Image: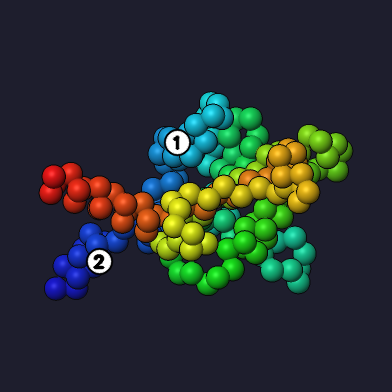
Amino acid sequence: MEQTCSRKSWEEAGLTDDFIFSKTFLDPKITLELLRRIFPTMTIKGIKILNSQQEIKTTHDAKSSRFDIYVKDYDNRHYDLEIQVENNHNLPQRARFYQSSLATAAYTKVKNYIKANKSFVIFFCCFDPFGLGEQRYDVKRIIENYPNYTYQDHEKSVFFSILLVTEKRLAQSCKTYWT
């Protein structure tokens, strides 16, 4: 009886389950394809999965960050893939914190600042993270009075509402079915 219950819960678990998310994106082929679809204008030749549940702590008393999936591509760009099930209304601050953790790995003692690795924090949310009705939000810094000026700190955060993707696909499926 217990075995059946366990099997049923695994069968019902989806990509939003932390274990399933980690196991899925530990497969380099799947993760490479995902990154290529997220960033179609970038050439991503290949990747190396550095770790799942990678913990980075800068000092003994600092809050540590734990990346769900930590990836580096062949051009030394770093990616943090996160699944966010609950809306704690702190995603901009979390993205900033994760970016600062990625920056720790981007700068070495002898490396010039201009040669820092590019970093990407990618959140897959089970809700609309900003409540604006979009499926994807690309966030990078700008100079307020010059929004068209390219501020090149090489950090970018991307937020996906997988809830909206599901709702829009369902709506499209219904529309196709009923017409």
Q: Which quadrant of the rendered structure holds the C terminus? A: top left
Q: 87 or 23, which is in the foreground?
A: 87
Vertical relation: 119 (above or below) 129: above
Q: Residue shown at 48%/39% (left/top)?
A: 38
Percent of width and height locating residue 98 = 64, 57
Left or right: residue 9 versus residue 63 is left
- Residue at which label 2 appears: 9
Residue 83 appears in view: no
- Residue at which label 1 appears: 37
> Which amino acid is tagged 2?
Ser
Give the CA separation, mark 2 to mark 1: 30 Å
Foreground disc of the pair 2, 1: 1
> Which amino acid is tagged 1?
Arg
Percent of width and height locating residue 32 = 47, 35
Secondary structure of the residue carrying numbered label 2: helix
Q: Residue shown at 77%/64% (left/top)?
A: 59
Q: 116 or 20, which is in the foreground?
A: 116
Secondary structure of the residue carrying numbered label 1: helix
Left or right: residue 168 versus residue 138 is left
Sooner in the amino-acid sequence: mark 2 or mark 1: 2
Q: Residue shown at 71%/39% (left/top)?
A: 148
Disc sitting over residue 82 in the figure: none
For label 2, the crowd category at 10 Å Cα-Cα, with few meaning under 14, some 14 to 19 and many 20 or more, is: few
Q: Residue shown at 75%/60% (left/top)?
A: 58
Percent of width and height locating residue 4 = 16, 67
Percent of width and height locating residue 172 = 25, 47
